Image: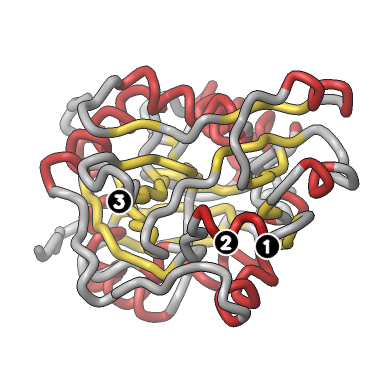
Amino acid sequence: MSKLSSKTNQVGYALTPKKEKTFILPSLLSHASKNGVVLTKIDPHKPLIQQGPFDCIIHKLYGSDWIQNLKNFTSQNRDIPIIDSPDSIEVLHNRISMLETVSKLKITNTGVPKQFTVTEVTDLENLKLTFPLIMKPLDADGSETSHKMHLIFDNDGLKNLTPPFVLQEFINHGGVVFKVYVAGEYFRSVKRRSLPDIPDDEMVNLKGSLPFSQVSNLAAAGGGEGCDFEKSQMPPESLVKELVKGLREDLKLNLFNFDVIRDVRNKDNYIVIDINYFPGYAKMPDFESVITDFLWDIVHKEKNGEN
């Protein structure tokens, strides 16, 4: 959809160098510019009130200095949207609070994995989950450490882990994960290859733990069943739409994605296993158009006095 306007809309962006490299692509800048949206780089080390003017600001930076910079700007520019609120983003930095949101929605045929938070080693004495388990760091802040996950097969596999972390029951899901990218009212769903299934009779041969980076070796060694990736069906559009609407409203966020798997033991059940803020949108179909339309809508809804 063309968003041509007699006036260009200035959108400031403040991103880490890594995020800027994967998001602010020439194809996005070109498409946005042709449709009345100009993306301008923000210097996060300088006061925002000395930069611009901006019709909207998008960001993926953390830290007290940046948050204070945003607060100072907002105090003098209350009509300029900030995408998104640091307080709302913070919910997704903890793997417990992020999935609590899904549970509260109570959407039919959806849920979250059984999980247990370990803040100190003695917590493991009260573990009531069934192996295999997935260990995920408690913090989900996009750092390198937050991505270091393990597949745990037995109690021995728990011995060398350093709290805090979250343990989730592994659910066989046909080796397919569905990623839903959300940008305001727009969303796109894609499927990606995931961890292989682990049949019950294979569990007796699997010991200790395995970093996710080596899980591919599990399938190569015969542990895990194959999947027919091409024939795997996407979740029902109506269910995805309901999840998107519920998460947007509850999280009060515009830019995020969530990962969904289908339980092979009950193929009508879909499990949300992760939610990420400001994901890799370039992997989303029609990325340039979706982001441009989203930014244009945000600016014009604000100008028209819409909520």
Element assignment for label 1: helix
Task: Please report contact status of discs 2 and 3: CB closer than 8 Å, yes or no.
Answer: no
| Of callouts 1 and 3, the N-terminal one | 1
Q: Nearer the viewer, residue 159 or 62?
A: 159
Where is residue 301? Give x, y as percent.
Answer: 20, 36
Instruction: Indicate whether 178 appears above or below 191.
Output: above
Marks 1 and 3 sit apart, C-alpha to C-alpha, by 52 Å
Q: Mark 3 highlights which residue?
A: 295
Q: Which residue occupies 70% across, 50% down?
A: 152
Marks 2 and 3 sit apart, C-alpha to C-alpha, by 49 Å
Instruction: Classify mark 2: residues with Cα within 10 Å, few (<14), some (14-19) or many (20+).
Output: few
Q: Mark 2 highlights which residue?
A: 202
Q: Nearer the viewer, residue 138 or 305?
A: 138
Q: Write down the quadrant of residue 214 in the picture.
A: bottom right
Left or right position of 299 against 64: left
Q: Which residue occupies 26% across, 35% down?
A: 243
Task: Please name the amino acid that badge 3 sits on.
Answer: Leu
Instruction: Indicate whether 230 appears above or below 206.
Output: below
Element assignment for label 2: helix
Q: Nearer the viewer, residue 65 or 266?
A: 266
Q: Which residue occupies 75% across, 57% down?
A: 207
Task: Please name the amino acid that badge 2 sits on.
Answer: Glu
Q: Write down the quadrant of residue 67 in the picture.
A: top right
Q: Mark 1 highlights which residue?
A: 205
Q: Which residue occupies 88% across, 28% down?
A: 121
Left or right position of 35 against 212: left
Foreground: disc 1 or disc 3: 1
